[in-house]
Image: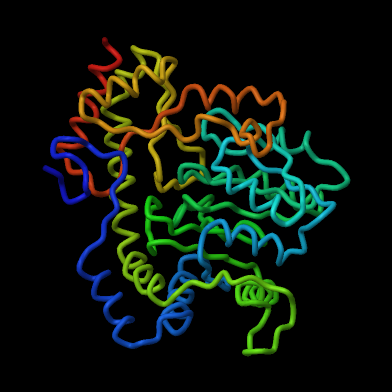
Amino acid sequence: MRSELGTPVGLVPATGVLIGAEEREAVDRVLSSGLLAQGAEVATFESEFAAYVHDRPCVAVNSGTSALLLGLLALGIGRGDEVVVPSFSFAATANAVALTGATPVFADIEPRHFCLDPAAVLAALTPRTAAVMPVHLYGHPASAELAAVAERHGLALVEDAAQAHLAALDGRPVGTLGQVAAFSFYPTKNMTCGEGGLVVCADDALARRVRLLRNQGMERRYANEIVGYNARMTDIHAAIGRVQLGRLPAWTRTRRANATFLSAALDDVAADHGLTLPAIAQGAEPVWHQYTLRAPRRDELVATLAGLGVQTGVYYPTPIHRLPAYDLDLDLPVTAAAAREVLSLPVHPALDQDGLERIVAATAQAVAE
């Protein structure tokens, strides 16, 4: 027997994709119209998302990876350039840089929030550095010092905000801190389109270039101005996204409440058993894409929690620079430690109070064994 989320009854799932009647109705509306490709739904979705990022121009595309790639290309990043990125992230962060022809340069993270360490970024700069790409990992904003470093050295700041919808730093929404930001709408993100991404641009000129890049280099049919891609979002995906975006503020409040509950309930357990609970930086308003803690015997804890009916996630067990696609021998000690120790407990808005209490009880039991 399985629950509405598709998981066995009695299991607390690591993630929860919430799709309801409104999303189905939105898809049916588009299907009935016969207008399925990029059109009015996409344009409306872009304008509705813009309201959450200080009305910056937004360009919807077919994936979060495409959003990163087209944003970098629109800035002129390419062969001969270097872009400083964290290795503790999903591979798409570095892949997007490599696909432009530029070189991803991996820097270490800071230990409390798992985001790029400004000091490590400074040490990684060379005359070829063109941009810094912080990842707002697990929904926690990266340090404001990174924007200062980029500005001081004349570099572009490209935000990988794939996991950080509605997060903010010092009152500014994530997505408005640099020249370009990329969001993802993959099913496991805080909101979904089914699949898709979106580029937030600092000005209209950048946005126009991203629009050209996503649509074969043309704004008008058969008037191709540059060599571009087919990275369009469909109206079907945008219609789903519009419904999900309307629900996102309430879901975000629930994620924050769930994280607050977990931190309070696990505080004594963590102190007694060497766990490190997630921390919030001063001025940061995270959105808890993941509730990620450190455990010295992580793999044992994951297995024990699974046996107790609580799914967890390990993001990311192999740093990008150690993946076969890159295979670099680098000394990134904080990254290496995080890869060994992190695990993420469920924090998604599909959890009820019983689920939250089961997570706490199972964690306490698991670490005591």
For the residue pair 131 and 150, the one nearer the viewer reads as 131
**Horizontal side, residue 35 vs residue 101: left or right:** left
Give the quarter of the image for residue 114.
Answer: top right
Against 273, residue 35 (above or below) is below
Give the quarter of the image for residue 70.
Answer: bottom right
User: Which quadrant of the rendered structure holds the C terminus?
Assistant: top left
Residue at figure coordinates x 27%, y 17% from the top left: 366
Against 325, residue 197 (above or below) is below
The percent coordinates of residue 349 (x first, y second) are 27, 49
The percent coordinates of residue 264 (x first, y second) are 29, 30
The percent coordinates of residue 62 (x first, y second) are 51, 66
For the residue pair 329 and 114, the one nearer the viewer reads as 329
Residue at figure coordinates x 27%, y 24% from the top left: 305
Against 48, residue 96 (above or below) is above
The percent coordinates of residue 233 (x first, y second) are 48, 72
Residue at figure coordinates x 66%, y 49% from the top left: 133
Residue at figure coordinates x 46%, y 66% from the top left: 52
Q: Residue most toward the front?
A: 324
